[in-house]
Amino acid sequence: MSEVLQVEEQKIVTTARHPRNNPQWPKIGIFAQRGKNRPNRLGLSIVQILERKGKVPRVAHLDAIDGTPVLDIKPLMAEFLPQGDIRQPPWVKELMADYWKVG
């Protein structure tokens, strides 16, 4: 398998930054946000499987750069999700308001 690197080495972020470069939001570390310029170049998405044709699944809600290799597929079970309330700062709702809108 050939290596697909969508983020150039010099663009990797290892310091705190404003999410989406918005100075109204606090500077936070790259592992506290979902930016693509991560030092580990790995991601995780929870997707909905729409159909399967042979060995090829068609999914919805995949949060990845086009061409990213899929390393593993596992079923989602409620017991593996965070237990209790999920805590996040108020600005996250603003950041994510239009995330899944198409077009």
Image (spheres, rainbow, N blue to C red):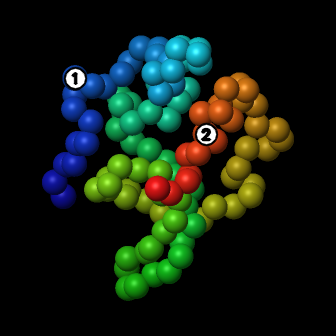
User: Residue 25's spot in the image, x, y percent?
Assistant: 59, 18
Mark 2 touching mark 1, by CB under 8 A? no
Q: Residue furthest right?
A: 84
Label 2 – label 1 distance at C-alpha: 27 Å
Q: Residue furthest left?
A: 2
> Looking at the image, is 54 positioned above or below residue 13?
below
What SS does tag 2 mark?
A: helix
Name the residue tied to disc 1: 10
What kind of residue is marked 2? Answer: Met
Q: Residues within 10 Å of mark 1 (few under 14, many from 20)?
A: few
How many numbered discs, if any?
A: 2
Q: Residue furthest front?
A: 103
Is 27 left or right of 6, judged from the image as shown? right
SS class of the residue under badge 1? helix
- Residue depicted at x 39% and y 42%: 42
Q: Residue at x 71, y 50 (%)?
A: 81
Question: Toward the viewer: 11 or 22?
Answer: 22
**Residue pointed to by mark 2:** 96
- Sort mark 2 into few (<14), some (14-19) or many (20+) by Cα contacts within 10 Å: few
Occupied quadrant, residue 96: top right
**Of callouts 2 and 1, which one flags the residue occurring earlier in the amino acid sequence?**
1
> In the rendering, at what x and y percent does residue 47 appear?
55, 61
How far from the left and from the top, in percent, is residue 37? 36, 31
Q: Could you tell me which quadrant the N terminus lies in?
A: bottom left
Relative vertical location of residue 20 with respect to residue 69 in this rendering, above or below: above
Snapshot quadrant of residue 82: top right
Would you say residue 87 is visible in this rendering?
A: yes
Q: Is residue 52 left or right of residue 12?
A: right
